[in-house]
Protein backbone atom coordinates (compact mmCIF):
# COMPACT_ATOMS: atom_id res chain seq x y z
CA UNK A 1 0.00 0.00 0.00
CA UNK A 2 1.04 3.57 -0.57
CA UNK A 3 -0.32 7.04 0.03
CA UNK A 4 -2.99 8.59 -2.19
CA UNK A 5 -2.51 11.73 -4.26
CA UNK A 6 -5.53 13.44 -5.83
CA UNK A 7 -4.57 16.55 -7.75
CA UNK A 8 -2.39 18.69 -5.50
CA UNK A 9 -3.46 16.89 -2.33
CA UNK A 10 -1.88 13.81 -0.73
CA UNK A 11 -3.01 11.74 2.24
CA UNK A 12 -1.02 8.99 3.98
CA UNK A 13 -3.65 6.30 3.49
CA UNK A 14 -5.51 5.29 0.30
CA UNK A 15 -8.96 5.86 1.75
CA UNK A 16 -11.76 8.29 0.99
CA UNK A 17 -14.66 8.41 3.43
CA UNK A 18 -17.80 8.27 1.32
CA UNK A 19 -20.34 11.07 1.42
CA UNK A 20 -23.57 10.24 3.24
CA UNK A 21 -26.20 12.90 2.70
CA UNK A 22 -28.46 14.87 5.02
CA UNK A 23 -25.95 15.19 7.86
CA UNK A 24 -24.75 11.58 8.24
CA UNK A 25 -21.27 12.60 7.12
CA UNK A 26 -20.97 16.16 8.33
CA UNK A 27 -18.00 18.09 9.61
CA UNK A 28 -17.32 15.95 12.67
CA UNK A 29 -16.94 12.66 10.78
CA UNK A 30 -15.08 14.25 7.86
CA UNK A 31 -12.73 16.06 10.22
CA UNK A 32 -11.78 12.95 12.15
CA UNK A 33 -11.20 10.92 8.97
CA UNK A 34 -8.96 13.70 7.68
CA UNK A 35 -7.14 13.86 11.02
CA UNK A 36 -6.44 10.13 10.82
CA UNK A 37 -4.88 10.45 7.36
CA UNK A 38 -7.69 9.76 4.92
CA UNK A 39 -9.83 12.07 2.80
CA UNK A 40 -12.77 13.31 4.88
CA UNK A 41 -15.92 14.09 2.93
CA UNK A 42 -18.85 16.31 3.92
CA UNK A 43 -21.99 15.32 1.98
CA UNK A 44 -23.64 18.51 0.75
CA UNK A 45 -27.17 17.19 0.19
CA UNK A 46 -29.77 18.52 2.62
CA UNK A 47 -27.26 19.98 5.07
CA UNK A 48 -29.38 23.03 5.85
CA UNK A 49 -32.14 20.98 7.50
CA UNK A 50 -31.86 20.63 11.27
CA UNK A 51 -29.65 23.74 11.56
CA UNK A 52 -30.26 27.24 12.94
CA UNK A 53 -30.07 28.52 9.36
CA UNK A 54 -33.34 26.75 8.41
CA UNK A 55 -36.69 28.31 9.27
CA UNK A 56 -38.85 25.74 7.51
CA UNK A 57 -39.12 27.71 4.28
CA UNK A 58 -35.63 28.85 3.27
CA UNK A 59 -34.05 25.55 2.17
CA UNK A 60 -31.88 27.10 -0.55
CA UNK A 61 -30.59 29.85 1.72
CA UNK A 62 -29.79 27.49 4.60
CA UNK A 63 -28.07 24.78 2.57
CA UNK A 64 -24.88 26.61 1.44
CA UNK A 65 -24.52 28.32 4.82
CA UNK A 66 -24.68 24.96 6.58
CA UNK A 67 -22.18 23.45 4.13
CA UNK A 68 -19.66 26.17 4.91
CA UNK A 69 -20.21 25.60 8.64
CA UNK A 70 -19.49 21.88 8.30
CA UNK A 71 -16.33 22.35 6.24
CA UNK A 72 -15.02 24.83 8.81
CA UNK A 73 -15.91 22.39 11.59
CA UNK A 74 -13.90 19.67 9.83
CA UNK A 75 -10.86 21.90 9.51
CA UNK A 76 -10.99 22.78 13.21
CA UNK A 77 -10.55 19.05 13.86
CA UNK A 78 -7.94 18.52 11.12
CA UNK A 79 -6.34 21.89 10.26
CA UNK A 80 -3.84 20.35 7.83
CA UNK A 81 -6.03 17.50 6.64
CA UNK A 82 -7.67 16.93 3.28
CA UNK A 83 -11.38 17.73 3.52
CA UNK A 84 -13.68 17.55 0.52
CA UNK A 85 -17.36 17.48 -0.36
CA UNK A 86 -19.73 15.17 -2.18
CA UNK A 87 -22.16 17.17 -4.33
CA UNK A 88 -25.00 15.39 -6.14
CA UNK A 89 -25.64 16.50 -9.71
CA UNK A 90 -29.32 15.67 -9.18
CA UNK A 91 -29.97 18.40 -6.61
CA UNK A 92 -31.52 21.70 -7.66
CA UNK A 93 -28.80 23.84 -6.09
CA UNK A 94 -25.87 21.76 -7.37
CA UNK A 95 -23.97 24.70 -8.84
CA UNK A 96 -24.39 26.87 -5.75
CA UNK A 97 -23.30 24.08 -3.40
CA UNK A 98 -20.14 23.37 -5.40
CA UNK A 99 -19.22 27.05 -5.31
CA UNK A 100 -20.01 27.32 -1.58
CA UNK A 101 -17.76 24.32 -0.90
CA UNK A 102 -14.88 25.93 -2.78
CA UNK A 103 -15.38 29.23 -0.98
CA UNK A 104 -15.19 27.41 2.37
CA UNK A 105 -11.91 25.70 1.51
CA UNK A 106 -12.88 22.23 0.30
CA UNK A 107 -9.84 20.63 -1.34
CA UNK A 108 -11.74 17.98 -3.33
CA UNK A 109 -15.18 17.92 -4.96
CA UNK A 110 -16.61 14.46 -5.60
CA UNK A 111 -19.70 14.44 -7.78
CA UNK A 112 -22.18 11.75 -8.82
CA UNK A 113 -25.93 11.01 -8.99
CA UNK A 114 -25.74 12.19 -12.57
CA UNK A 115 -22.89 13.15 -14.88
CA UNK A 116 -20.97 16.23 -13.64
CA UNK A 117 -20.28 17.50 -17.15
CA UNK A 118 -19.98 21.17 -16.17
CA UNK A 119 -18.08 20.73 -12.90
CA UNK A 120 -14.81 22.33 -14.15
CA UNK A 121 -16.66 25.53 -15.06
CA UNK A 122 -18.04 25.81 -11.54
CA UNK A 123 -14.60 25.54 -9.96
CA UNK A 124 -12.63 27.63 -12.49
CA UNK A 125 -11.82 30.26 -9.83
CA UNK A 126 -10.36 27.57 -7.54
CA UNK A 127 -7.76 25.69 -9.66
CA UNK A 128 -6.30 23.99 -6.59
CA UNK A 129 -9.58 22.11 -5.96
CA UNK A 130 -9.38 18.52 -7.19
CA UNK A 131 -12.35 17.23 -9.20
CA UNK A 132 -13.51 13.62 -8.93
CA UNK A 133 -16.51 12.20 -10.81
CA UNK A 134 -18.33 9.05 -9.68
CA UNK A 135 -19.12 6.52 -12.42
CA UNK A 136 -20.28 2.93 -12.69
CA UNK A 137 -19.14 2.31 -16.27
CA UNK A 138 -16.24 2.95 -18.60
CA UNK A 139 -18.72 4.58 -20.99
CA UNK A 140 -19.68 7.21 -18.40
CA UNK A 141 -16.04 7.90 -17.59
CA UNK A 142 -15.23 8.30 -21.27
CA UNK A 143 -18.10 10.75 -21.76
CA UNK A 144 -17.01 12.89 -18.80
CA UNK A 145 -13.33 12.91 -19.75
CA UNK A 146 -14.05 13.81 -23.39
CA UNK A 147 -16.34 16.65 -22.32
CA UNK A 148 -13.90 18.04 -19.76
CA UNK A 149 -10.96 17.83 -22.13
CA UNK A 150 -12.74 19.49 -25.05
CA UNK A 151 -14.63 22.17 -23.15
CA UNK A 152 -12.27 22.94 -20.28
CA UNK A 153 -8.85 21.59 -21.21
CA UNK A 154 -8.55 19.41 -18.13
CA UNK A 155 -8.98 15.83 -16.94
CA UNK A 156 -10.39 14.50 -13.65
CA UNK A 157 -7.95 14.33 -10.74
CA UNK A 158 -9.32 10.90 -9.81
CA UNK A 159 -12.31 8.74 -10.74
CA UNK A 160 -14.48 6.84 -8.27
CA UNK A 161 -15.93 3.60 -9.64
CA UNK A 162 -19.03 2.74 -7.61
CA UNK A 163 -20.35 -0.83 -7.51
CA UNK A 164 -24.18 -0.72 -7.72
CA UNK A 165 -24.37 -4.27 -6.40
CA UNK A 166 -22.93 -3.31 -3.01
CA UNK A 167 -22.92 0.49 -2.50
CA UNK A 168 -25.43 2.37 -0.39
CA UNK A 169 -27.60 5.37 -1.21
CA UNK A 170 -28.40 6.40 -4.78
CA UNK A 171 -26.98 4.05 -7.42
CA UNK A 172 -25.93 4.71 -10.99
CA UNK A 173 -27.56 1.70 -12.63
CA UNK A 174 -30.98 0.57 -13.78
CA UNK A 175 -32.93 -1.31 -11.13
CA UNK A 176 -33.28 -4.49 -13.20
CA UNK A 177 -29.51 -4.79 -13.68
CA UNK A 178 -28.54 -4.45 -10.03
CA UNK A 179 -27.70 -7.82 -8.51
CA UNK A 180 -28.07 -9.62 -11.84
CA UNK A 181 -24.47 -10.79 -11.81
CA UNK A 182 -23.64 -8.79 -14.94
CA UNK A 183 -21.59 -6.10 -13.24
CA UNK A 184 -17.87 -6.58 -12.58
CA UNK A 185 -16.58 -3.73 -10.45
CA UNK A 186 -12.89 -4.43 -10.87
CA UNK A 187 -13.17 -5.00 -14.59
CA UNK A 188 -14.67 -1.50 -14.63
CA UNK A 189 -11.83 -0.16 -12.44
CA UNK A 190 -9.25 -1.60 -14.82
CA UNK A 191 -11.25 -0.43 -17.83
CA UNK A 192 -11.30 3.14 -16.56
CA UNK A 193 -7.56 2.99 -15.88
CA UNK A 194 -6.90 1.65 -19.38
CA UNK A 195 -9.06 4.40 -20.88
CA UNK A 196 -7.10 7.08 -19.04
CA UNK A 197 -3.72 5.58 -19.92
CA UNK A 198 -4.29 4.58 -23.52
CA UNK A 199 -6.55 7.38 -24.76
CA UNK A 200 -5.33 10.26 -22.61
CA UNK A 201 -1.81 9.20 -21.58
CA UNK A 202 -2.74 10.00 -17.99
CA UNK A 203 -1.94 8.29 -14.69
CA UNK A 204 -5.00 9.22 -12.64
CA UNK A 205 -6.08 7.41 -9.43
CA UNK A 206 -9.07 5.10 -9.81
CA UNK A 207 -10.94 4.54 -6.54
CA UNK A 208 -13.14 1.52 -5.79
CA UNK A 209 -16.37 2.28 -3.92
CA UNK A 210 -18.93 -0.18 -2.58
CA UNK A 211 -18.56 -3.33 -0.52
CA UNK A 212 -15.33 -2.37 1.27
CA UNK A 213 -15.56 -3.07 4.99
CA UNK A 214 -12.46 -4.87 6.28
CA UNK A 215 -8.69 -4.85 5.77
CA UNK A 216 -9.16 -7.95 3.65
CA UNK A 217 -11.60 -6.03 1.41
CA UNK A 218 -9.14 -3.13 1.18
CA UNK A 219 -6.25 -5.38 0.19
CA UNK A 220 -8.45 -7.14 -2.37
CA UNK A 221 -9.39 -3.81 -3.95
CA UNK A 222 -5.76 -2.76 -4.24
CA UNK A 223 -4.74 -6.16 -5.61
CA UNK A 224 -7.47 -5.90 -8.25
CA UNK A 225 -6.10 -2.62 -9.54
CA UNK A 226 -7.69 0.18 -7.48
CA UNK A 227 -5.45 2.97 -6.20
CA UNK A 228 -7.62 3.41 -3.14
CA UNK A 229 -11.06 2.76 -1.72
CA UNK A 230 -14.08 4.81 -0.74
CA UNK A 231 -15.84 3.60 2.42
CA UNK A 232 -19.05 5.02 3.85
CA UNK A 233 -21.19 2.52 5.80
CA UNK A 234 -18.23 1.38 7.90
CA UNK A 235 -17.96 4.85 9.45
CA UNK A 236 -21.61 5.14 10.56
CA UNK A 237 -21.18 3.22 13.81
CA UNK A 238 -18.46 5.50 15.15
CA UNK A 239 -18.57 7.99 17.97
CA UNK A 240 -17.67 10.71 15.49
CA UNK A 241 -20.43 10.06 12.93
CA UNK A 242 -22.83 12.99 12.80
CA UNK A 243 -26.00 10.84 12.89
CA UNK A 244 -28.25 10.38 15.92
CA UNK A 245 -27.47 7.36 18.10
CA UNK A 246 -30.76 5.75 17.02
CA UNK A 247 -29.60 5.88 13.40
CA UNK A 248 -26.41 4.07 14.37
CA UNK A 249 -28.47 1.54 16.31
CA UNK A 250 -30.42 0.74 13.14
CA UNK A 251 -27.16 -0.50 11.62
CA UNK A 252 -26.35 -2.51 14.75
CA UNK A 253 -29.80 -4.11 14.77
CA UNK A 254 -30.23 -4.87 11.06
CA UNK A 255 -29.80 -8.26 9.45
CA UNK A 256 -28.52 -8.93 5.96
CA UNK A 257 -32.04 -9.55 4.68
CA UNK A 258 -33.23 -6.16 6.00
CA UNK A 259 -31.13 -4.34 3.39
CA UNK A 260 -32.78 -3.92 0.01
CA UNK A 261 -33.33 -1.77 -3.04
CA UNK A 262 -35.85 1.07 -3.26
CA UNK A 263 -36.79 3.45 -6.05
CA UNK A 264 -35.99 7.03 -5.17
CA UNK A 265 -38.24 9.87 -6.33
CA UNK A 266 -35.04 11.18 -7.97
CA UNK A 267 -35.53 8.45 -10.57
CA UNK A 268 -32.57 6.41 -9.32
CA UNK A 269 -32.48 3.11 -7.44
CA UNK A 270 -31.15 3.27 -3.91
CA UNK A 271 -30.07 0.83 -1.22
CA UNK A 272 -31.43 1.17 2.29
CA UNK A 273 -32.85 -0.63 5.31
CA UNK A 274 -36.10 -1.11 3.49
CA UNK A 275 -38.70 -2.59 5.86
CA UNK A 276 -40.37 0.77 6.63
CA UNK A 277 -40.67 2.15 3.09
CA UNK A 278 -44.46 1.86 3.07
CA UNK A 279 -44.65 3.68 6.43
CA UNK A 280 -42.61 6.54 4.95
CA UNK A 281 -44.99 6.74 2.02
CA UNK A 282 -48.12 6.54 4.17
CA UNK A 283 -46.87 9.30 6.46
CA UNK A 284 -46.62 11.75 3.57
CA UNK A 285 -50.05 10.73 2.28
CA UNK A 286 -51.70 10.94 5.73
CA UNK A 287 -50.22 14.35 6.43
CA UNK A 288 -50.97 15.57 2.90
CA UNK A 289 -47.35 16.62 2.49
CA UNK A 290 -46.64 18.65 -0.62
CA UNK A 291 -43.10 19.14 -1.91
CA UNK A 292 -41.63 21.23 0.93
CA UNK A 293 -38.22 22.10 -0.48
CA UNK A 294 -37.86 21.45 -4.22
CA UNK A 295 -34.46 19.95 -3.48
CA UNK A 296 -34.21 17.77 -6.61
CA UNK A 297 -34.12 18.82 -10.26
CA UNK A 298 -36.14 15.74 -11.15
CA UNK A 299 -38.52 14.35 -8.53
CA UNK A 300 -41.59 12.22 -8.95
CA UNK A 301 -42.90 13.40 -5.57
CA UNK A 302 -42.59 17.04 -6.56
CA UNK A 303 -44.39 16.58 -9.87
CA UNK A 304 -46.89 13.82 -9.14
CA UNK A 305 -46.66 12.99 -5.42
CA UNK A 306 -45.33 9.54 -6.25
CA UNK A 307 -43.31 7.64 -3.63
CA UNK A 308 -42.31 10.10 -0.84
CA UNK A 309 -40.28 13.22 -0.06
CA UNK A 310 -36.80 11.77 0.19
CA UNK A 311 -34.79 14.63 1.69
CA UNK A 312 -37.13 14.98 4.66
CA UNK A 313 -37.32 11.20 5.11
CA UNK A 314 -33.52 11.14 5.31
CA UNK A 315 -33.56 14.10 7.68
CA UNK A 316 -35.99 12.35 10.03
CA UNK A 317 -33.76 9.28 10.14
CA UNK A 318 -30.67 11.38 10.86
CA UNK A 319 -32.51 12.90 13.83
CA UNK A 320 -33.47 9.45 15.13
CA UNK A 321 -36.94 8.75 13.69
CA UNK A 322 -36.49 5.16 12.52
CA UNK A 323 -40.22 4.57 11.98
CA UNK A 324 -40.78 7.09 9.18
CA UNK A 325 -37.18 7.99 8.38
CA UNK A 326 -35.13 6.53 5.53
CA UNK A 327 -31.83 4.83 6.44
CA UNK A 328 -29.51 4.48 3.46
CA UNK A 329 -26.75 1.87 3.76
CA UNK A 330 -24.49 -0.45 1.80
CA UNK A 331 -24.83 -4.22 1.65
CA UNK A 332 -22.34 -4.69 4.50
CA UNK A 333 -24.13 -2.52 7.09
CA UNK A 334 -25.33 -5.66 8.89
CA UNK A 335 -21.70 -6.39 9.81
CA UNK A 336 -21.64 -3.50 12.28
CA UNK A 337 -21.55 -4.99 15.79
CA UNK A 338 -20.42 -2.14 18.04
CA UNK A 339 -19.86 1.59 18.28
CA UNK A 340 -16.19 2.26 17.64
CA UNK A 341 -14.02 5.22 16.66
CA UNK A 342 -12.60 6.47 13.38
CA UNK A 343 -9.08 5.93 14.72
CA UNK A 344 -9.87 2.31 15.61
CA UNK A 345 -11.05 1.68 12.04
CA UNK A 346 -7.81 3.14 10.66
CA UNK A 347 -5.85 1.04 13.16
CA UNK A 348 -7.52 -2.09 11.83
CA UNK A 349 -7.41 -1.26 8.14
CA UNK A 350 -3.79 -0.13 8.09
CA UNK A 351 -2.37 -2.15 11.00
CA UNK A 352 -1.57 0.86 13.10
CA UNK A 353 -0.36 0.85 16.69
CA UNK A 354 -0.88 4.09 18.59
CA UNK A 355 -1.20 5.90 15.27
CA UNK A 356 2.20 4.63 14.03
CA UNK A 357 2.34 2.28 11.01
CA UNK A 358 3.53 -1.23 11.85
CA UNK A 359 6.04 -3.01 9.68
CA UNK A 360 4.74 -3.49 6.11
CA UNK A 361 1.86 -1.10 6.72
CA UNK A 362 1.24 2.11 4.78
CA UNK A 363 4.16 4.50 4.56
CA UNK A 364 3.23 8.16 4.35
Image (cartoon, rainbow, N blue to C red):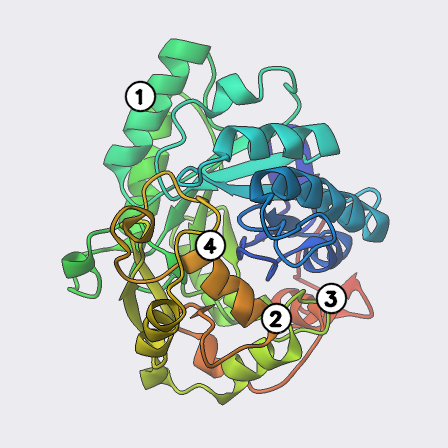
Q: How far apart, in angstroms, are the residues tagged by discs 3 and 2?
A: 39 Å
Name the residue: 57% across, 84% down: 249
User: Contact, CB < 8 Å: mark 3 with mark 2?
Assistant: no
* SS at mark 1 in the image: helix
Location of residue 237 (image quadrant): bottom right
Neighbor class of circle 4 (other Cα within 10 Å; few <14, some 14-19, many 20+) is some
Total labels: the figure holds: 4
Residue 157 vertical position relative to residue 46 in the rendered view, above or below: above
Location of residue 206 (image quadrant): top left
Residue annotated with mark 3: 358
Name the residue: 66% across, 29% down: 102
Q: Position of residue 310 (x, y in %)?
A: 41, 59
Q: Position of residue 302 (x, y in %)?
A: 34, 48
Residue annotated with mark 1: 199
Q: Nearer the viewer, mark 4 or mark 2?
A: 2
Neighbor class of circle 1 (other Cα within 10 Å; few <14, some 14-19, many 20+) is few
Name the residue: 53% across, 57% down: 20
Residue annotated with mark 4: 222
Q: Nearer the viewer, mark 3 or mark 2?
A: 2
Neighbor class of circle 2 (other Cα within 10 Å; few <14, some 14-19, many 20+) is some
Q: Nearer the viewer, mark 4 or mark 3?
A: 4
Residue annotated with mark 2: 319
Left or right: where 117 falls relative to 249: left
Amino acid sequence: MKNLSIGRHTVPYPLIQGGMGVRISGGRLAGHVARCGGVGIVAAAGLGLNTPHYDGKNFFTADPLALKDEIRKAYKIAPSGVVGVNCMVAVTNYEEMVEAACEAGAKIVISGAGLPLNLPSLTADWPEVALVPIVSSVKAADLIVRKWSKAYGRLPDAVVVEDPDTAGGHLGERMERIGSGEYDQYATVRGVRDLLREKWNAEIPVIAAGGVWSREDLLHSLKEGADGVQMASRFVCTEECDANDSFKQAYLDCNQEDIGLIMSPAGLPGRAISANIEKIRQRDIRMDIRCPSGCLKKCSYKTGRELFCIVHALDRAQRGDLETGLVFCGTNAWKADRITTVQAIFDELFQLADGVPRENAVNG
